[in-house]
């Protein structure tokens, strides 16, 4: 029965990786209560600018009916179309325009609101593919995709292997090879799913790469899903280019916009995971109609939407917040790579996101998955840090680990980096 | 492609019924702006006690971080396990115990929180059945079940016809016949889904009926899903009995609790549809584990949960609210049936819910679905009321319509009932 599948940790999850959070929970680091405990660097939360939201709330907020942040109880209580509440789609379209560089205009009619980006991806996959059909995803990739894409839709993921020599960046040639291989296996490929900035690497795709990918999906007559949930976490010296911008620059060309869809949300850029607001942005009228109906299964609270409408309509707040968030993310990344350089740990080049993708191959006896698992356990139990192993991200090369540096305070990050010192010359485990 | 299916109004929806809301939206009744417009009695919203919630908010609420209704921004912002936020499961378990008669204790460990009851049902069906398997549902039934159960899970609904002579109440014999018929067709039946109080009839099941149904699912080794979202809308002179209470009274018997699951939510009893809080309550450890994982696709905002924890922890408010809600629902029902009696319209006996299930067979030229559709259109365009046709609820008898009387104000209901006067002696359409 289906039940058993999920109860036993489910299709697409990896038992071993799941042991990380469990161990962490039982032995979580605390500077006073448990200073030798395990530091959680495996969860991609962004807590760097919550103080700014807290400040805004303190001065602007009331839940009192009639107040701007809780405009009308009857309206909020009785709204059945949660994907279309008040001016929320307009507010999100405007916010996305600012986050994605200020050069773009998103049409509120293309915004579908969901209970988070994960639900948005699942809903999109339900719309685009039948059970047994396949989605190409450059690997290493965010391990949550396994759940979002495979669990309930029964759609397959075909990882497209990317390698360190190219900073794990996808090329058209990689896609062609994976696509042909899928056809040979008799699989129908429905879409390519990218994350940009990429999770776990933090790579930010340039225009040429985006163009080549759009060109690929156009030629194959398949869809492109661009997960841009970290768009507001691009480092200060870098520039984020949304797939929407590439489409706009080719407005006159024959490219079919209806085959491109963007995933967005407020979990990462605003750090509000618990509020559950995700977005599918699409130019495809049929998809917008279908997805609007399917939001009945992943709706967002109108109470929360009321608050976010007020928060995101405050343009001064939004501008300051986004600038400060990029600044703090950049500082954190610099702190991490400075320490890694000093220790002598190799890392992939990141231009955004809230991760650093490090290589600990020199600590492993061999390049097997088993050795990577052993090293992951050693990091957990002996070094005292929880990192996400490359194995969990379907990385084709062994020895890579993801550090999430935005979920802990600065002092804790310092301690975690100190602990990694031991790895400089390899380890005995 | 799947997309086309949903974009074109989807598997399981009925085009005709969908025209009701569309027409209503373009010609909505307004006492000043559009006094000849159509009155919406087709949507099962409960607006009767929103003033009590509004009053509570006015005196108790602040979104200020640190305040009881918004306890801790960092906690709310970063909570990834939305089905297990703060004391929310305990608060909902306690609330369910009070709503369902005060004689029951629900275990917080059995509470799974979802983004509304619709998502809860879909999630449960994903856990219990494979594509192509079937669920028995006494008909007429809530038309939303078609979407919740069939759309994405690809599970079949087998309506179990119930008839007016028995007030549309299910019997074990009806279930046996439907079950055997399914087996003959080669279908695997996984569960029975009941709504109690029933939507659209408003029937409240007695202990003997519940016992006979539990006994049936036990004998067939299948599951029982009891949708009790209107438990707090049982009329004052009636008594609600949850399926949980029957199970408790048979604690010593060999009945398998792990095959019984309750659906609950705050959309109807509290009238807070837009807040998106539903519950799966189960005694099945494996199901609880599976469903907890699947809540990633239908999570509830922690911001909203914070507010509800404060609201539902106020025992004086909860007690007063529930009593007043039952009082107002009862008054409304009495008003409707008094008018119907006076007009001479036959109706089914209700003991709860926010509907009246009326028979307009005397207005139809014949008992075909086509005639029922014509009458529905006549009611919309000529009489000026939108009712839900029995056809949309898979009713096996023609001529039945559902009135929802809790979504309009008292004056509007008076006008709607006046308009129905014309139907007393039959109509020409």
Image (cartoon, coloured by chain):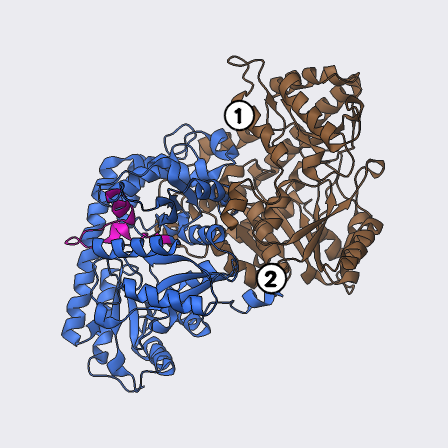
Chain colours: A brown, B blue
- Can residue A320 be seen in the rendering of this structure? no
Chain ID, mark 2: A
Magenta highlight range:
B224-249
Around disc 1, counting alpha carbons within 10 Å, would you say few (fewer than 14), some (14 to 19), or many (20 or more)?
few
Q: For residue A287, which numbered disc appears in the image?
A: 2
Q: Label 2 vs label 1: CA separation? A: 41 Å
Along the viewing direction, whichever of B85 and A72 lies nearer the viewer: B85
Which one is in front, A54 or B31? Answer: A54
Q: Is residue A228 visible?
A: yes
Where is residue B207 drawn, in percent x and y? 22, 53
Query: Quick one: label 2, few (<14), some, or many (20+) residues within 10 Å?
Result: many
Q: Is residue B59 magenta?
A: no
Q: Report if residue B240 lies within the magenta region.
A: yes
Q: Is residue A65 above or below residue B25?
A: above
The residue at the point 63 percent across, 38 percent down is A14
Give a yes or no on whether discs 2 and 1 share a subunit: yes
Q: Earlier in the sequence, mark 2 or mark 1?
A: 1
Check disc 2 and report its element: helix, strand or loop. helix
């Amino acid at each position: 029965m289906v039940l058993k599948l999920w109860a036993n940790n489910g299709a697409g999850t990896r038992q071993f990786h799941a042991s990380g959070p469990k161990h962490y929970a039982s032995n979580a680091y605390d500077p006073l209560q448990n200073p030798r405990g395990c530091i959680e660097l495996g969860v991609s939360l962004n807590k760097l600018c919550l103080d700014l939201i807290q400040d805004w709330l303190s001065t602007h907020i009331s839940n009192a009916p009639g107040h701007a942040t809780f405009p009308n109880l009857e309206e909020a209580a009785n709204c059945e179309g949660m994907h279309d509440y008040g001016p929320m789609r307009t507010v999100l379209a405007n916010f996305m325009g600012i986050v994605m560089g200020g050069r773009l205009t998103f049409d509120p009619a293309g915004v579908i609101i969901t209970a988070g980006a994960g639900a948005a991806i699942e809903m999109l996959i339900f719309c685009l593919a039948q059970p047994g059909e396949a989605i190409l995803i450059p690997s290493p990739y965010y391990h949550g995709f396994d759940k979002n894409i495979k669990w309930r839709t029964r759609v397959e993921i075909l990882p497209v292997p990317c390698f360190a020599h190219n900073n794990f960046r996808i090329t058209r040639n990689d896609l062609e090879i994976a696509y042909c291989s899928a056809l040979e296996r008799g699989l129908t490929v429905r879409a390519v799913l990218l994350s940009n900035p990429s999770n776990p690497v933090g790579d930010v795709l340039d225009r040429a790469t985006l163009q080549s990918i759009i060109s690929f999906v156009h030629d194959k007559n398949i869809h492109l899903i661009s997960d841009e949930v970290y768009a507001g976490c691009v480092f200060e010296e870098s520039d984020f280019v949304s797939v929407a911008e590439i489409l706009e620059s080719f407005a006159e060309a024959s490219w079919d916009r209806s085959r491109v869809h963007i995933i967005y949300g407020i979990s990462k850029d605003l750090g509000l995971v618990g509020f559950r607001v995700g977005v599918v942005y699409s130019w495809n009228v049929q998809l917008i109609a279908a997805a609007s109906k399917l939001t009945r299964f992943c709706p967002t609270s109108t109470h929360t939407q009321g608050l976010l409408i007020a928060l995101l309509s405050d343009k001064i707040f939004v501008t300051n917040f986004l600038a400060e968030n990029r600044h703090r993310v950049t500082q954190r990344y610099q702190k991490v790579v400075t320490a890694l350089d000093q220790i002598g740990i190799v890392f992939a080049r990141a231009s955004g996101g809230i991760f650093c993708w490090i290589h600990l191959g020199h600590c492993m006896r061999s390049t097997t998955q088993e050795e990577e698992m052993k090293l992951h356990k050693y990091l957990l139990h002996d070094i005292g840090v929880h990192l996400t192993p490359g194995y969990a991200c379907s990385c084709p090369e062994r020895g890579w680990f993801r550090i999430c540096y935005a979920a802990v305070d600065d002092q804790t990050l310092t301690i975690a980096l100190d602990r990694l010192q031991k790895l400089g010359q390899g380890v005995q485990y």
